[in-house]
Image (cartoon, helix red, strand yellow):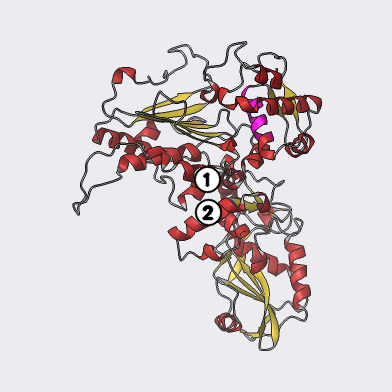
């Protein structure tokens, strides 16, 4: 909300205090203005009033001659990296207000995010960093600047800014869904009235880049973008929930990122799988304090916590993606990456080191995910309490993965339980792991119909034998994408879609399949890189 004339006059009567700074500005933007900008940004924020002059220890409104021109000049300077290290302001932070017939320019400076501090003027952060102390601005001591730098450097991979994208590249439907949930959880929160761009900055899904524009970070991408857009940045990105409750059918239910029937991001994946994953879990008979039957207990909550953990702690640059498999008596959660803390420490609880702190924050703001680091410790306790076999947690390497398997039926024989992974590489030889996404029975040569064989053409280096059985109907489109990439290794997703007249999601699925089958790989970045044929 913008300050009113009455509120501005009240601030002026209070004089310059820790959160208010008054400037004459009759001669333009003074150097002391930028010192105050730096000081407020590096401390707790504050308000700068331009057009207020101090006379005899009292402040009076003198106004500025041309508020519009002064505001434009301010924006030019604050976006100039030669002048100030970073612009942390949005349009709503700078405006003019008529006070007693004169224009006063208001600059509301918020506290800068940790990764943006120190905010400094000029080129030298050690001489150009300021903080607020009482009624004035002061140079930060060298040690204070170093402390801010240490805090700024403690970032996780999902903080990586994607300056080739804007907020408009994200899925508006997912953002709206998230904001509705946020509002239902926090109905009176001041962020509810913010525009999407600033809201995403506040929840750590986006940030202002060096160009002065707001861009999503990796967390914002995987939480709120569509599958094809995510694949442009993370070629190995993959989400798959598989449910098989009977041996009579292949899958009772399935949700996969490449379905092209939904967005394919991790937030929507959580919502789609949330109820599916516990729908057939038996609830032990239990009565609450009011004498009513308990329909859902800590077993259900722990299972959903494991789902959230797989999404929050995954290494999205890793291979084989996130795979959740639900069977009649077990549910397994597998994601790229190994524990960031010692496994025993993680199981003991109390220590949390999220691989993706921004995704952690985005989920926690809408009550998804355990913030205390007690999830695994509680897991063992809950299963013991309900007489269920102990969960099995294992780490795999090359590629790195964590897998958690829980039993949902107490009658399961322990003789058939999977064994934990070897504790050391020397204790047992490592057996190469087949990606569970594509480890199904592959067709033998000659079993395809004449129609299918005609569609794919002659065999080439086992291409067809290694193709996922459940995606056989897409093999023709995958081969066309493969041939187009061979002809033009610098082909882009958009270019392939236009060339082959395919939907972008179809291109994304085809490339994801080719990468997982190790037929192609990406070399270099999105702009200057190229595709390389492996086999």
Image coords of residue 158 (percent x, y) = 58, 42
Q: Which residue is mark 2?
A: 177
Residue 415: name its quadrant.
top left
234 relative to 437, above or below: below
Image coords of residue 69 (percent x, y) = 79, 74
30 relative to 230, above or below: below
Image coords of residue 84 (percent x, y) = 71, 59
In the image, what residue occupies the spot 72% across and 35% down? 525
Q: On the picture, is 473 further left or further right than 366?
A: right
Residue 419: name its quadrant.
top left
Q: Are marks 1 and 2 in contact (CB under 8 Å)?
A: yes
Q: Quadrant of the N terminus?
A: bottom right
The answer to whether residue 28 is visible is no
200 relative to 498, above or below: below
Q: Secondary structure at mark 1?
A: helix
List the single residue furthest toward the front: 450
Q: Residues within 10 Å of mark 1 (few under 14, many from 20)?
A: many
Q: Is residue 514 magenta?
A: yes
Q: Secondary structure at mark 2?
A: helix
Q: Nearer the viewer, residue 306 or 218?
A: 306
Q: Which residues are magenta?
A: 507-517
Q: Nearer the viewer, residue 267 or 336?
A: 267
Image coords of residue 60 (percent x, y) = 65, 86
Q: Quadrant of the C terminus?
A: top right
In the image, what residue occupies the spot 28% across and 46% down? 295
Q: Earlier in the sequence, mark 1 or mark 2?
A: 2
In the image, what residue occupies the spot 34% across and 41% down? 300
Q: Which residue is mark 1?
A: 268
The majority secondary structure of the magenta stretch comes to: helix
């Amino acid at each position: 909300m913008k300050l009113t004339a009455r509120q501005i006059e009240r601030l002026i009567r209070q004089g310059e205090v820790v959160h208010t700074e008054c400037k004459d500005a009759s001669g333009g933007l003074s150097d002391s203005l930028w010192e105050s900008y730096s000081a407020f940004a590096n401390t707790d924020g504050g308000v700068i009033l331009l057009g207020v002059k101090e006379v005899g220890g009292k402040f009076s409104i003198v106004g500025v001659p041309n508020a519009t021109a002064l505001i434009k000049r301010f924006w030019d300077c604050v976006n100039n990296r030669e002048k100030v290290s970073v612009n942390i302001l949005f349009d709503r932070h700078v405006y003019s207000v008529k006070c007693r017939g004169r224009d006063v320019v208001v600059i509301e400076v918020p506290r800068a995010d940790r990764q943006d501090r120190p905010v400094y003027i000029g080129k030298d952060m050690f001489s150009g960093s300021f903080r607020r102390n009482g009624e004035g601005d002061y140079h930060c001591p060298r040690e204070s600047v170093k402390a801010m730098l240490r805090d700024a450097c403690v970032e996780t991979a999902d903080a990586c800014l994607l300056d080739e994208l804007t907020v408009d590249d994200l899925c508006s439907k997912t953002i709206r869904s998230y904001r509705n949930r946020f509002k239902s959880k926090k109905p009176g929160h001041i962020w509810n009235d913010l525009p999407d761009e600033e809201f995403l900055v506040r929840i750590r899904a986006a940030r202002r880049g060096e160009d002065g524009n707001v861009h999503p970070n990796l967390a914002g991408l995987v939480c709120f973008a569509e599958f094809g857009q995510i694949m442009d940045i993370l070629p190995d990105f993959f989400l798959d929930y598989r449910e098989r409750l009977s041996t009579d059918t292949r899958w009772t239910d399935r949700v996969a990122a490449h379905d092209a029937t939904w967005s394919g991001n991790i937030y929507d994946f959580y919502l789609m799988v949330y109820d599916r994953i516990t729908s057939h879990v038996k609830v032990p008979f239990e009565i609450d304090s009011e004498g009513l039957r308990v329909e859902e207990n800590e077993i259900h909550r722990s299972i959903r916590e494991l789902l959230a953990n797989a999404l929050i702690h995954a290494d999205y640059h890793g291979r084989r993606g996130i795979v959740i498999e639900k069977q009649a008596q077990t549910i397994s959660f597998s994601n790229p990456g190994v524990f960031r803390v010692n496994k025993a420490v993680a199981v003991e609880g109390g220590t949390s080191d999220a691989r993706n702190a921004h995704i952690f924050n985005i989920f926690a703001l809408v009550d998804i995910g355990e913030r205390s680091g007690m999830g695994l410790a509680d897991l063992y306790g809950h299963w013991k309490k309900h007489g269920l076999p102990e969960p099995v947690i294992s780490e795999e390497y090359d590629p790195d993965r964590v897998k958690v398997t829980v039993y949902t039926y107490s009658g399961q024989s322990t003789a058939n339980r999977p064994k934990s992974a070897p504790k050391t590489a020397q204790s047992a030889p490592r057996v190469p792991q087949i990606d569970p996404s594509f480890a199904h029975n592959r067709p033998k040569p000659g079993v395809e119909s004449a129609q299918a064989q005609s569609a794919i053409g002659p065999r080439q280096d086992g291409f067809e034998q290694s193709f996922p059985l459940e995606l056989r109907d897409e093999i023709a489109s995958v081969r066309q994408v493969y041939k187009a990439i061979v002809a033009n290794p610098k082909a882009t997703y958009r270019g392939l879609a236009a060339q082959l007249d395919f939907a972008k999601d179809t291109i994304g699925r085809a490339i994801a399949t080719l990468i997982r089958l190790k037929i192609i790989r990406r070399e270099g970045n999105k702009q200057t890189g190229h595709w390389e044929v492996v086999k």
